[in-house]
Amino acid sequence: MAEEVDEDVQEQSPKAGGIVGKLVPLAAVLVFLVVGAAVFMLVISPMLSDEEPDETEDMASETQGDEFPLQPAMVVTLDSSFVNLMREGDSAAPMLIYGVKLECNDQATLDLVVVNQHRFEDMVMKLHDSRTRGELDDILAFKESVQRQALQKANDILVRLQGDNPAENVKITKVLHYQMAVQDPQ
């Protein structure tokens, strides 16, 4: 009787293992095929294609919130700089490190800004100077405030540089910080 049970178990094991044994490798092959096809379609095929993506759709979606349409990059990157913040007590003054970019409306604006870059760097430095550490606790509000003021002052500088007949299209469209850090003393 015990021998009959062992024989039944032995007879059922190869049959069950045979079906499962054949399905596992088949499933593994299918998984590899699906993953390979996905990698080819999503990664390799776009790299091999000669067509360039249509950028007008991307630019249209990006310009919906801007008051000025996006154009090819006409940006002047001002040298990054630093200013000492006002001291609080007898401690050493914290340092504010910043970098600003000016987005120009057209090539004429870009040329005018590049020739007079020192004026714009001085204006930006004055906007960052003489601040307290407390003003920088809300860094986003500080950045927005400085960017708004810098935009107004930069356009005022452009008007003065043009003299009696300033062109309407010569203007800075946006002021952006590309670097902003506060270094507290040790």
Image (cartoon, grey):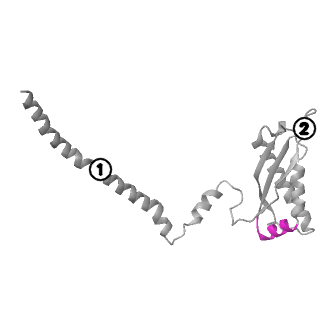
Please state which amino acid type lies under the numbered disc 2: Ala
Q: Is residue 179 left or right of residue 8?
A: right
In reply to whether residue 183 is colored magenta, the answer given is no
**Residue at x-position 28% and y-position 51%:** 25
Looking at the image, which is closer to me, 52 or 31? 31
Say the numbered circle drawn on residue 27: 1
| Callout 1 amino acid | Ala
Mark with earlier residue (2, 1): 1
Asked whether the beta carbons under mark 2 and mark 1 sit within 8 Å of each other, the answer is no
The magenta-colored residue range is 105-115
Coordinates of residue 108 in the picture (x, y in percent): 80, 70
Q: Secondary structure at mark 1?
A: helix
- Res. 100 image quadrant: bottom right
Which residue occupies 69% across, 55% down? 66
Q: Residue at x 59, y 65 (%)?
A: 56
Please give the residue where the numbered disc 2 appears in the rendered image: 92
Q: Residues within 10 Å of mark 2 (few under 14, many from 20)?
A: some
Instruction: Find out whether residue 107 is within the magenta segment.
Output: yes
Q: Is residue 14 above or below residue 33?
A: above
Image quarter hosting the N terminus: top left
In this rendering, is residue 85 above or below 78? above
Task: Name the element at disc 2.
Answer: loop
Inter-mark Cα distance, 2 to 1: 67 Å
> Left or right of 13: which side holds 47?
right
Q: Position of residue 157 (x, y in %)?
A: 89, 60
Determine the residue located farthest toward the top in the rendered image.
1
Q: Secondary structure of the magenta portion, mostly? A: helix
Residue 170 appears left or right of 18:
right
Residue 53 pos. (x, y %): 54, 66
Q: In front here: 67 or 20?
A: 20
Q: Of residues 82 and 173, which is closer to you in this image?
A: 82
Q: Residue 131 appears at what percent x and percent y? A: 88, 42
